[in-house]
Amino acid sequence: MPVKKKRKSSGAAAADDTSLKKCKLGRSQPSGKVISGEEHFSSKKCLAWFYEYAGPDEVVGPEGMEKFCEDIGVEPENIIMLVLAWKLEAESMGFFTKEEWLKGMTSLQCDCTEKLQSKFDFLRSQLNDISSFKNIYRYAFDFAREKDQRSLDIDTAKSMLALLLGRTWPLFSVFYQYLEQSKYRVMNKDQWYNVLEFSRTVHADLSNYDEDGAWPVLLDEFVEWQKVRQAS
């Protein structure tokens, strides 16, 4: 989710806009063999694609990012944008530098809208791989935080946790409520990393939670808070 602000998007219809520059994903040889788009990746074309969205500072900023999202038919808040940012190794939410774009899109072998759209299933599949998801989750902390801060402000942390764990962690809605009423105003990196580990290892009824384990105080207090709620 590399765009911090949102405007109404034309969604999938943008992908059908005849004004968009199309590219062929493959072509047939007389033998019937199809040559994939990857074999025809063009760095020059990829750079020209970048400049469709970049400003004079040679960076795709928030406005260019909104147009980019419209063109590929993806909402800025869609998790696929976070996975794409991870693939591009983007440092800051809402921005793609020329170097990040060229390195990442070259890795994906994408030099136009249609080729990137053809990679959506692959990008989504990264979320189902345990190792890749862990890397994306850890990447999200530094990606989303203000660069002059060592921690995530709690509102940003809640939004990112909702994006990453909201659909898969049974206790997420309860944990979200806990954060809402808690004293915490920021979440540090150790807390962020441990929330993922907690979500993967601790049962929804908290029956296997080890009070003597090396969990951050934030999670100890969450467990205590939830047990009080369950007992009432």
Image (tube, rainbow, N blue to C red):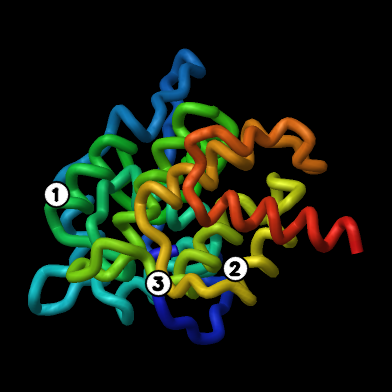
Q: Amino acid at mark 1?
A: Lys
| Identity of the residue drawn at 40% across and 37% down | 135
Task: Decide which of tag 3 and tag 1 comes sooner along the chain.
Answer: 1
Please tell me how crowded label 2 is: few (under 14), some (14-19), or many (20+) other residues with Cα within 10 Å.
some
* Residue 44's disc number: 1
Question: Residue 138, image x and y in percent?
Answer: 39, 44
Task: Decide which of tag 1 and tag 2 comes sooner along the chain.
Answer: 1
What residue is pinned by disc 2?
179
Quick check: 130 above or below 77? above
Question: Residue 32, image x and y in percent?
Answer: 51, 18
Please tell me how crowded label 3 is: few (under 14), some (14-19), or many (20+) other residues with Cα within 10 Å.
some
| Identity of the residue drawn at 19% across and 51% down | 100
Measure how far apart labels 3 and 2 are at the Cα level.
Answer: 12 Å
Quick check: 132 above or below 206? above
What residue is pinned by disc 3?
153
Quick check: 84 above or below 133? below
Task: Decide which of tag 3 and tag 2 comes sooner along the chain.
Answer: 3
Q: Secondary structure at mark 1?
A: helix
Q: Tell me which corner region of the image, top left, top right, bottom left or bottom right, holds residue 210.
A: top right
Single out the mark in the foreground, 3 or 2. 2
Q: Amino acid at mark 3?
A: Asp
Measure how far apart labels 3 and 1 are at the Cα level.
Answer: 40 Å
Q: Amino acid at mark 2?
A: Leu
Question: Residue 109, image x and y in percent?
Answer: 31, 37
